[in-house]
């Protein structure tokens, strides 16, 4: 395992897409120390900004100890291995990810898992905007894998997503699943306004307490059923495998809305009704 401890301060962002099991794999400690990253617009070696320690011979597992909220692009495009961050993490964490695991014991910034294709990202705190989403100018959001956020998520979670699963244990901001083409978004807390705007397909499940009211759905969604959420059983095994505790809401009554009829109208939003 490679252990990294940040030794820089200030608000200058660090661009570190080379902090990745793929980039560390097969390299000696000296080679890892000389891996290139950027501090603002200044080219640096990894050892200039991080203390680097090794434990054992495995260098496809990375442990980062400390606040790296100003470090962007950690795990970008990774296909294997594991990154654990004991602290907050910066923007673009796990962007374009194709495999492996990222676990964060803190909060993350915008674009968590942006355009990822596979793998697992678990965040113990809150996430910023656009989790699992497509970058501006792109219509290819999350296309596989799973993101689990124990806290809240910001706006436009799952923007343009096509496959995969996003689980938010807290609240989700506005426009969750905007332009969604497939996949599933679970929100255990309150769902923000205009969820599923211009969705083509896919599923959004709002598991909030019915006493908290209904989210502000667009008028281009049509309520067409209130029934037991039977197809939730398709997800139970997967969610339990990732440590998601199920409760009575998984077997309760849900109101189903079809939409967005401004588009194909093949999407669905389920609202918990008790």
Image (tube, rainbow, N blue to C red):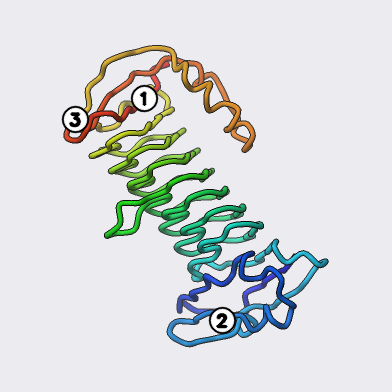
Could you tell which of marks 3 and 1 lies nearer the N-terminus?
3
Q: Of helix, strand and loop, which one carries label 1?
A: strand
Q: Position of residue 55 (x, y in %)?
A: 80, 67
Q: Give the residue displayed 45% in from the left and 63% down from the top.
A: 91
Give the farthest residue toward the right: 56
Classify mark 1: residues with Cα within 10 Å, few (<14), some (14-19) or many (20+): many
Which residue: 42% across, 40% down? 171
Identify the element where label 3 is drawn.
loop
In primary-sequence order, the first of circles 3 and 2 is 2
Q: Residues within 10 Å of mark 3 (few under 14, many from 20)?
A: some
Position of the C terminus, as image quadrant, is top left
Q: Give residue 77's position: percent from left, percent from top.
A: 51, 61
Compared across the picture, whether 102 is left or right of 184 comes to right
Q: Which residue is mark 3?
A: 261
The residue indicated by pointer 2 is 36
Foreground disc of the pair 2, 1: 2
Marks 2 and 1 in Cβ contact (< 8 Å): no
Who comes first in sequence, dot 2 or dot 1?
A: 2
**Quarter of the rendering containing residue 261:** top left
In contact (CB < 8 Å): disc 3 and disc 2: no
In the image, residue 77 above or below residue 31: above
Tell me the residue that label 1 is attached to.
Answer: 270
Query: Relative to the observer, which residue lies in front, 177 or 8?
Result: 177
* x, y percent for residue 192: 32, 39
């Amino acid at each position: 395992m490679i252990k990294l401890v940040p030794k820089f301060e200030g608000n200058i962002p660090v661009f570190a897409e080379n902090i990745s099991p793929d980039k560390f794999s097969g390299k000696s400690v000296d080679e890892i120390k000389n891996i290139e990253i950027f501090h603002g617009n200044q080219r640096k070696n990894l050892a200039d900004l991080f203390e680097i320690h090794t434990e054992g011979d495995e260098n496809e597992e990375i442990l980062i100890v400390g606040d790296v909220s100003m470090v962007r692009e950690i795990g970008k495009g990774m296909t294997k291995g594991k990154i654990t961050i004991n602290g907050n993490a910066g923007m673009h964490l796990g962007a374009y990810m194709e495999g492996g695991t990222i676990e964060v014991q803190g909060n993350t910034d915008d674009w968590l898992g942006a355009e990822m294709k596979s793998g697992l990202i678990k965040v113990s705190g809150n996430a910023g905007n656009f989790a699992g989403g497509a970058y501006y100018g792109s219509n290819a959001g999350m296309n596989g894998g799973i993101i689990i956020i124990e806290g809240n998520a910001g706006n436009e979670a799952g923007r343009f997503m096509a496959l995969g699963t996003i689980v938010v244990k807290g609240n989700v901001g506005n426009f969750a699943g905007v332009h969604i083409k497939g996949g599933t978004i679970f929100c255990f807390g309150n769902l923000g306004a205009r969820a599923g705007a211009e969705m083509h397909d896919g599923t959004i499940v709002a598991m909030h307490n019915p006493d908290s009211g209904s989210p502000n759905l667009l008028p281009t969604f049509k309520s067409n059923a209130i029934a037991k959420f039977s197809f939730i059983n398709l997800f139970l095994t997967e969610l339990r495998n990732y440590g998601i505790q199920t409760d009575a809401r998984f077997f309760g009554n849900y109101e189903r809305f079809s939409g967005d009829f401004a588009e194909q109208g093949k999407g669905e939003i389920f609202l918990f009704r008790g």
